[in-house]
Structures are given as C-alpha cells and as structure tokens.
Image (cartoon, rainbow, N blue to C red):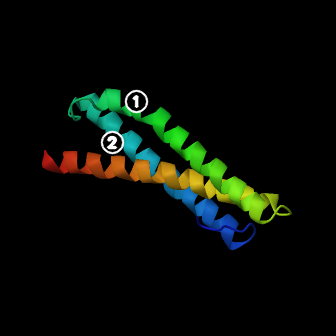
Amino acid sequence: MTRYKSGGAADAALMGSLVRLWLEAGTVMMMRTGMSLFQTGPAGEEVRMIAEKPAAFLQAQVAATAAAGAAITRDPMDPMGAMVAAGRAWTGVISRKTSANRRRLNRHISAK
C-alpha cells in the first residue's frame, strides 16, 4: 500500500489527481455525447455507461476506506494524512476506469 502524508506536496498531488480526473471525465462525457447525438457509438454503450458506475464507485470506496484506515493506524495524530490517502486511493481507482473508457472510445472513433 502506498503511504501518503498530508501537507504541501501531498495536497498538491491530490489536487493534481482531481484535476486530471475532471479533465478525463469531461473528455469521456464529450465523446459519449457526440456518439449518441450522431448514433455512432459502440453497441451497448448506453447500457455500459450506466452499468459500470456502481461497481467502480464501490471499488473506489473500498480502496479509500482501506487507505484511510491504514493511514490513521500508522499515524493517529495525522487525520489529514488519512483524508489525503483516501482521496488519492479514490481518485486512483476512478481515474483508471475513466482512462480505460477514454482509450476504448478513442479506438472506436479511430476505427471509423
């Protein structure tokens, strides 16, 4: 498990992760909107778009809870470290899912 500290660079890294997640999620939303407007999306994309979210959010929540628990056990006097660890773990899981969607949709667009 990766160790995260709070303050300074750790907080900046968390903010960077959130910005990257925001940009990638926006890109995926834009791609899916365009595909549904022009009806060029892969078969089953509408169902996939809805069905993938509960599992991804549950996986992210489990990772965040485990990271926060490990951080607070390691240093009980640093609750911000636990929050940073939870945030980094959560954004890490969601970012991997979002990146995979972006790559998959890019391949679909490139194949056209």
| Residue 32 left/right relative to 21 | left
Q: Above or below — where is 6 with respect to 89? A: below
The answer to whether residue 25 is above or below residue 9 is: above
Q: Which residue is mark 2?
A: 31
Q: CA distance from mark 2 to mark 1?
A: 18 Å
Nearest the eye: 40 or 105: 105
Mark 1 belongs to which amino acid?
Ala
The answer to whether 111 appears left or right of 23 in the picture is left
Residue at the left extreme? 112
Foreground: disc 2 or disc 1:
1
Which residue appears at 55% of the width and 53% of the height?
91
Could you tell me how many numbered marks the image carries? 2
Could you tell me which quadrant the C terminus lies in? top left
> What residue did someone put label 1 on?
51
Determine the secondary structure under disc 2: helix
Between disc 2 and disc 1, whose residue precedes?
2
Local crowd size for mark 1, using a 10 Å CA cut-off: few (<14), some (14–19), many (≥20): few
Say what secondary structure mark 1 lies in.
Answer: helix
Residue type marked 2: Met
Question: Where does residue 106 sit, x and y in percent of width and height?
Answer: 26, 50
Residue at left offset 38%, top offset 44%: 28
Residue 49 falls left or right of residue 69: left
The N terminus - image quarter: bottom right
